[in-house]
Image (tube, helix red, strand yellow):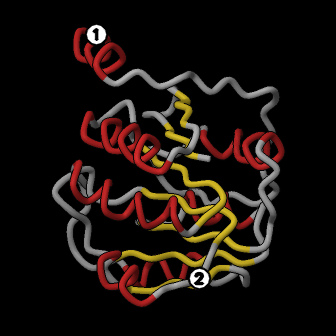
Amino acid sequence: MFLTLYKRIMFPIPEYVPIRTSHPKDILDVSSAWKGLELIIADITERFNIASDSCLEFGVEFGFSTVALSNYFKKVKGVDVFTGDIHTIHKGDHYQLTQKALEPYKNIELFKIDYKDWIRKDHDHYDLIHVDIVHTYRDTFNCGLWSVEHSTCTIFHDTESFIGVRRAVLNIAKKTGKKVYNYSKCHGLGIVV
């Protein structure tokens, strides 16, 4: 309770209140801290007039969010090292497992690569980018700043769970002059648009 209050006072972000929720047609049956956020993706894309051609996701893990996003975008690229990090429970290479689970979704393409290497080579612009990587301020800021500069809308998971993520989202919005919102449910979702 105290940490939540501290975060909201020290790093205030206007609350995102969805007008409506909707269930995507396809969803992957795996455990995920992202569950519940799939219900507001259509609301976000409609409210901010986000096109539906391309989506890039940093932090696929087992693919729940990737499949959820694939309902709303013609093409989704998923970037991950697929070995977990200091904040994940699962450690070890799970690329093959995730790739097999996502095979039926023909508009998803996975890339086993670190976000740092990806952003050095990619100069494309995306309609939406989702950032859910190692939850440090520095990594979230570096990946997130690139993402905001290369997308119409960038969303960040875990703004309520990790103070570094929340702080990075707020600082990225300030640095780029973009609007920022926070959906406080489901571990938090920062929206920079």
Residue 166 visible in this rendered orientation of the protein:
yes
The outermost residue toward the bottom is: 121
Left/right placement of residue 151 relative to residue 83 reads right
Say which quarter of the image contains residue 36: top right
152 above or below 46?
Answer: below
At 72% from the left and 43% from the top, the residue drawn is 44
In the image shown, does 40 or 17 lie closer to the viewer?
Answer: 17
At 77% from the left and 62% from the top, the residue drawn is 71
53 above or below 27?
Answer: below
Left/right placement of residue 132 relative to residue 76 reads left
At 26% from the left and 61% from the top, the residue drawn is 90
At label 2, the amino acid type is Asp
**Which mark lies nearer to you, 1 or 2?**
2
First in sequence, mark 1 or 2: give its number: 1
Left/right placement of residue 78 relative to residue 133 reads right
Mark 2, residue position = 124
4 above or below 76?
Answer: above
Residue 49, how many percent across, how many down?
A: 82, 50
Q: Which quadrant does the N terminus fall into?
A: top left
At 42% from the left and 90% from the top, the residue drawn is 121
Left/right placement of residue 126 relative to residue 35 reads right
Residue 113, how many percent across, how many down?
A: 35, 85
At label 1, the amino acid type is Met
Q: Which mark is residue 47?
A: none
Q: Residues within 10 Å of mark 1 (few under 14, many from 20)?
A: few
Residue 16, how many percent across, how many down?
A: 62, 27
Residue 60 visible in this rendered orientation of the protein:
no
The outermost residue toward the left is: 86
Mark 1, residue position = 1
In the image shown, does 15 or 187 lie closer to the viewer?
Answer: 15
